[in-house]
Structure formats: structure tokens, C-alpha cells
Image (tube, rainbow, N blue to C red):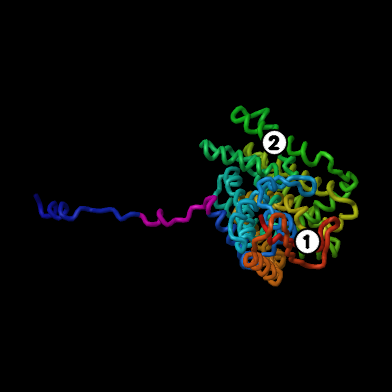
Amino acid sequence: MTENAVQEAEFPETRIPDIKKYIRFQPGLGWAFAFSFLILALKNDLADVFYPLLYNEDGRNIFGLFYNDHSIRNIFSSYSSYYQVLPRLAGYMLHFLPVTWIPSLYCLFALSFSALAYSLFYPLLNRLFRSPWFALYSVLILTALPLASHKLVGALMYQVWNGVIILGIAAFLPLPKKLLWKSLYLFAINVLIWSHPYCILVLPVYLYRIVFQKDNRWVYVLFTFSIFVYFGLTLHHHPLNWNSLLYFPSSLLGRVVTESVVGPMNRAWFQYLEISLIFGFLMIAFVGGMIGFSWKQMKGEEKWFYALSCYFIVSTLAVALLGRDLGDYYHLINGSPRYTYLPRIIFLMMLMAALFRLYQISSIFRKVHWVLAAGVLFFNASATVLYKTDLTVGQSVRDYVAYLDQHQTDCAPGEERWFTLHRGVWQFPGTPPDWSITSNLCRH
């Protein structure tokens, strides 16, 4: 044995492990959810958790309801002629915990559910474009833009709107394969169906799958049956105002398209300068041009994405208009963002897909892509005020639940001792004054 052979035997060559493969960041649904939650939380610095508002329906229709009568039957109590199972189910479960925790947990649940709705665009876009980085990037843009408000992401009752987003995305994605996950999936989808009348808009997708899909047809038959039962028990008598569709073009171009790109504050300026509709038309032309330019290179799933996205934009906006009186049109255009919340999110996803195609063309267009994306974020930065909440209102809620916790008392059978939190000066017709929260200290 030579000297070299002895050295080689005594000191065998070892491979140094590649540490990079263990620390390399891999995008995924979990990361999309974590980033979405972090961004939503930072928009208001978690103020709505530490100083919860119990905004409107959260206080009177969920907290007051379950605090006074913690009964499972209240999950199916009707509100505005339809059921809202999702927020009431969450409220029922949270009311097993100490009363001083409940308002903050309302908001934590709402933030988590909003983050889930946004993050589910990750598997959808990754499935369509086979690019996990683009899918994560799109989710971050969606979460960063002020398409919602503190009510839509931080109030429990308003999660019915994010439930519609999840319902629509789930209709595109494949079903879970394991029995346990499939059972939870069936339960969750039925809860979402029984939470908002917009579930009717997903019906064509279910019917298509029943007719043309061989596997798991019974699942979509079940969902379709659930939708029909829901409407049979709730909104079959709800009036529709067909004349309001006259405002569809201006609502689409101004409130949906323009506001999605430049934000609500700048959209108001565009509207004042009478260029909002022109800008909206140009943006639609841009997205349509990019779709037409790359149509031949698209796969079938991507074509279906654009087609169904157009369907959901038109249908969600049309339903929002049909449910409003002509006198409420100003409120729809300039007021609460929830009526155009869904079509704005869908249009933004179409815009992101068009920008992705622009990014793929050449290095020059990649620079244009980054400039456009940065411009959208810059123009929307002024609208973060939509997520700020009033700390004094939150403090009054904290004081209120602390009083309830400290003054629970033994009462005679049938005795009632009511304690009311009066808030604000605004009163909705047909409701108790000021959306006040009234709780019975004699809970039996």
C-alpha cells in the first residue's frame, strides 16, 4: 500500500452538503397566507384587534345575539331576508370563550379569513401560469392595494364577501383527495353557500361540471341542490330594480376599473376631472389587447380563467346594481366599497395576468411591467386611510365588555337587567337607534 493510499484510507473524502437547498425560499400557499395576514395587520397596526369596534352588525347582530342567547339555533337566524351562516357560526364558537376576549377574536378571525381569501389566488394562478413566484407576487399586490376597507377585512359580518371569493376560487380548483379533507371541504363550501346570495353566481360553473365532468359529479350536484334550497328559503321574494342597469357602463369603467388601478382617492379626482371613464376604457383596452395578443399561446385553462373572470365581473356588478334603488346610485358609486369589492378584485387579477404576459415578451417590457406595478402601488398609497379605525370607539367597546365581565349577576328566573352601549348618531331605518349593543346581565 502506497503512502498516498494510506492517506486516502485514513482521511476519506467527504462531501460538504449544499446548505442553500435547505434555506432556499420556496413560495407556497402557507407563505401567501402569512404575508397576506401580515400586510392586512400592518395596515391598521392591529389597532382593530386591541381596540375592537364591534362595527354595526358585529355588535348588534352577532355579539348581542349570542351573548344574550348562546343557542345554536341563532346560527340560522335571518338577516335582511337571507341567512349568513359563516359569521354567525364563528360568533357561536367564539362565545364559548371569556367575554373580554370576544371582540378582539372577532377581528382576528376576520383578518385571518380575509388573508385566506386573498392567499387562495396563489394555487389558482400557479395552476394556470405554472409560476409560483408570479402567483405569490400577485397575492402580495392584491393584499397591498386598498381594494377593501377596515370593515371588509376586520369585521366578522362582512366576511360573507370574502366567503364569495373563496367560493368562486374553489370552483376552479380540484377537490381534495383524502376523505377527511374532502369532508371538511364539503362542509366549508356549504357554509359559504348559506352565507351570501351571491352564491347563485357560481351555479353555472357547478352545472358545467355536472354536465361535462365525469369524476365527483355528485359533489357539484350537492352544491347545486344546496344553492336551490338556500334561495327557496330566503331571497325568492327579493325585489330587483332593472332600471339600475342603465348605470352599469359608468360603474364598470369608473368604480371598478379605474379605482382598481389608481385607488379610491385618485378615482374621485379622476371623476371630478371627468376622465375616470376614459381611463377605465383605456385600461380595459390594454387588458383586452394583451389577452388577444397571447390568445394563441394560451392553454385551455387560461382561456377559461379570462372568460369566467369576465363573467364574474359582469355578474357581480350587475347584481349589486339590481339590488339598489336608483336613489342609492350615488351611495354605490361614492360610498361603501363593498358593492364593487368583488369585481375590482377579479379585474385586478386579470390585469396582473396581462402584466405577466407583458413581462414574458422581452427585457424592455419587463421594465415596463415593473414601472406599471410600482405606479399602481404608488397611486394607491394614499388610500390606506380606509383601514384606520377610531381608537376611542374601540376603547368604549373594551370598557363595555369589561363591565359585562365584572357585573354578571345571579337573577331570579325570568328577570332581565339590560345594559346598553350607545354609539354614534347614525340610525339605519328599521333598526334600533345608533346600532347600539344591548346585553342582558341576567343570562340564564
Is 23 part of what is drawn in magenta? Answer: yes
Q: Decide: marks 2, 1 in contact (CB < 8 A)?
A: no
Is 29 part of what is drawn in magenta? Answer: yes
Relative to 15, 166 lies left or right: right
User: Which numbered tag is attached to residue 75?
Assistant: none
Outermost residue, bottom side: 392
Relative height, residue 30 to residue 409 (above, below): above
For the C terminus, the quadrant is: bottom right
Of marks 2 and 1, the one in the foreground: 1
Q: Amino acid at mark 2?
A: Ser
- SS for dot 2: helix
State how many labels appear: 2
Say which quarter of the image contains residue 303. Answer: top right
- Residue 367 lies, in percent from the top left, at 62, 59
- Residue 208 lies, in percent from the top left, at 69, 32
- Residue 221 lies, in percent from the top left, at 67, 31
User: Label 1 belongs to which residue?
Assistant: 435
- Residue 427 lies, in percent from the top left, at 83, 62
User: Label 2 belongs to which residue?
Assistant: 226
Viewer can see residue 276: no
Q: Residue at x 67, y 63 (%)?
A: 377
Q: Amino acid at mark 1?
A: Trp
State the residue in front, 92 or 22: 92
Disc 2: CA contacts within 10 A as few (<14), some (14-19) or many (>=20): some
**What stretch of residues is rendered in magenta?**
18-30
Say which quarter of the image contains residue 60. Answer: bottom right
Q: Residue at x 74, y 35 (%)?
A: 228
Disc 1: CA contacts within 10 A as few (<14), some (14-19) or many (>=20): many
